[in-house]
Amino acid sequence: MAYVRKDASTLTRAERRRFTGALLEIKRTGEYDEFVRTHVEFFVGDGDPGLRAAHMTPSFLPWHRRFLLDLETALRRVDSSVTVPYWDWTRNRGATSVPWTEDLLGGNGRRSDRRVTTGPFAYGGGRWTIREGITDGEYLTRDLGRSRDPIQLPTAADLKRALDDPVYDVSPWNSTVTRGFRNKLEGWGAGRGSVSWLNHNRVHRWVGGAMLTAASVNDPVFWLHHAFVDLQWSRWQQRHRSHRYLPAEPPGAGSPQRGRIVARHEKLPPWDVTPDELEDMSRIYRYA
C-alpha cells in the first residue's frame, strides 16, 4: 500500500518530532553524511567534463526522485511512520512560517555569521555537526530571503509557467534551454543575478547558507524542497499524460551531448535504475 507525503504545514507535533528524530538518528550513525557526499559527487555542471546525472540535465527530476526515496527508506528503517513532508514555498513564504519553526527545521541564521541557533539542527544542540561540506564550517547556516539584495520565493504563477509546457525537455538538454518543463522547473534562466534564478534554483538562493553549494543536503530543508519539486513532476505528468521523459534515445554520434546525459532507458548512476522505471511511483507513495 502506498504511503503518503504530507504538506509540512499539516504535520502534527508528533509527526514533526518523529521526522526530525529519524533525521537526527541517521545523522548520528553517519548514514546522513553519505547522502551529502553523493550529492556533491554528482553535481556536475554544463562546463564540467563527463556525465551530468543530477543537475542541468533531463535526469534532474528522476535522479532526485530516487535520491529522495533512498533518504525516505533510511528514515523509515528508524521509524516506519515517517515520510518526507513537502514545503509548499508558493504558500508558506515567510522566514518564520513553516518549515522554519522551533519544532521542525529551526529558524534563520544569526546576523553575524548566519549560524542556525534554533531547532533540532542547531550546532549548539550537539547533534548536527557538518562533516561533509564545501567549506570547513561545522555548523548549519541560513540567510532566509537574503539579508543583502533580498529576493522573493517563486510564486504559483512561476510554477504554472513550467507546468503549462507540455514538452519534458529539449536539445541541447542542458541549462541553456528556454523550452521544456524540466529546465523551467529546475530554474536555469537567462541573464545575470536574481532574474536568472527560477523555481527550484531560486528557492536554494532564498534559503542561502548551506543551500547555496553542492553540499546543500546538509540543510534538511533540501528534502522538503525536493519533495515539493517532485510533486510538481507528478502534477505535470497528470496534466500531460501523452508526454514523457525526453530524450527517449541517446544523442547521436557527433553530438556534444553524447555520453553526457541519460536517455529514458539508460541506467541512472549511481543506481541500477532508468528514468523510465522512475516515472510511476503510485505503488510506493502519493502526495496529500
Image (cartoon, helix red, strand yellow):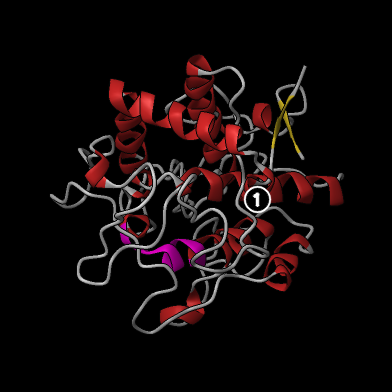
Residue 30 x/y as whole percent: 28, 24
Crowding at label 1, few (<14), some or many (≥20) Cα neighbours within 10 Å? some
Q: Is residue 206 magenta?
A: yes
Residue 71: image location, x then y, percent: 48, 29
Q: Which residues are magenta?
A: 202-209
Asked whether residue 267 is in view, the answer is no
* Left or right position of 224 against 237: left
Q: Identify which residue, 64 or 212, lies in the foreground.
A: 212
Q: Nearer the viewer, residue 16 or 31?
A: 16
**From the viewer's perspective, is residue 276 above or below residue 106?**
above
User: How many numbered circles are shown?
Assistant: 1
Amino acid on which disc 1 is placed: Ser
| Element at label 1 | helix
Lateral position of residue 111 relative to residue 244, left or right: left
Tell me the chief SS of the magenta region: helix
Residue topped by disc 1: 9
Q: Residue at left 45%, top 50%?
A: 102
Give residue 15's position: percent from left, percent from top: 60, 33
